Amino acid sequence: MATTDIATAEEIDRRVEAADTARRAKRSAAAKEVGELAQRRTVLAEQFAEVERQLGEVLADASDVLEIDELARFTNIPAADLTAWLTSRKPPRTAKKKRPAATASSGAPSAAKTSTNGQASVPPQPAVPRTDSADAPDRVTAGVT
């Protein structure tokens, strides 16, 4: 290989810049398209959620005069879809009353403890013998002589 075939420093800079420019343009176009599509998806998801909420409300309001199976026959919409729309609607929020917290000084043991997996566990209750005999079979004594 002859030394005259080697690119000069200026030629190398020009080639790298040309390659970077093409790559930068592709990256920019891809990022812009993803951003636009994500924004469009967000708007559509909000519209979709609103339509599902409205469907649930209409189904709930009509439940006293129209059964799901009957509505499915009238509309050719699967009953499973209608039921999903009805049950997925959010019920109106109600104010929750705060229960008084048990204090350590009250001496009352906590009714439930939280296990390591985050689920509440109820302490076992002591076994209490049954005192009712309504379900117990009558005893028969055998005469042994």
Image: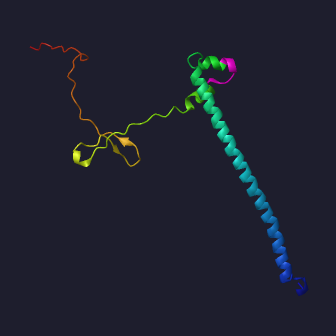
User: Relative to 121, is 131 above or below?
Assistant: above
Q: In which image quadrant can residue 32 be found?
A: bottom right
Magenta stretch, residue numbers: 73-79
Q: Residue at x 37, y 46 (%)?
A: 115
Percent x, y of residue 129:
21, 27
**3 lies left or right of 37:** right
Q: Height in image: 86 above or below 9?
A: above
7 vs 58, left or right, is right
Q: How many numbered discs?
A: 0
Q: Nearer the viewer, residue 94 or 83?
A: 94
User: Where 134 sits versus 130, above or below?
Assistant: above
Is 28 above or below relative to 11? above
Work out which quarter of the rendered image holds the C terminus and state it. top left
Q: Position of residue 58 (x, y in %)?
A: 61, 25
Q: Residue at x 23, y 32 (%)?
A: 127
- Percent of width and height locating residue 88: 56, 32
Colouring method of the image:
rainbow
Residue drawn at the location 20% of the way across and 22% of the way down: 131
Between 93 and 143, the residue placed more toward the observer is 93
**Image point 25% across, 43% down: which residue?**
109
Q: Residue furthest left?
A: 145
Instruction: Please state the horizontal and vertical placement of residue 62, each as a whole percent of the image.
Output: 59, 20
**Quick check: is 23 in the magenta stretch?**
no
Residue 109 appears left or right of 114: left
Q: Is residue 22 left or right of residue 135?
A: right
To which quarter of the image does residue 86 belong? top right
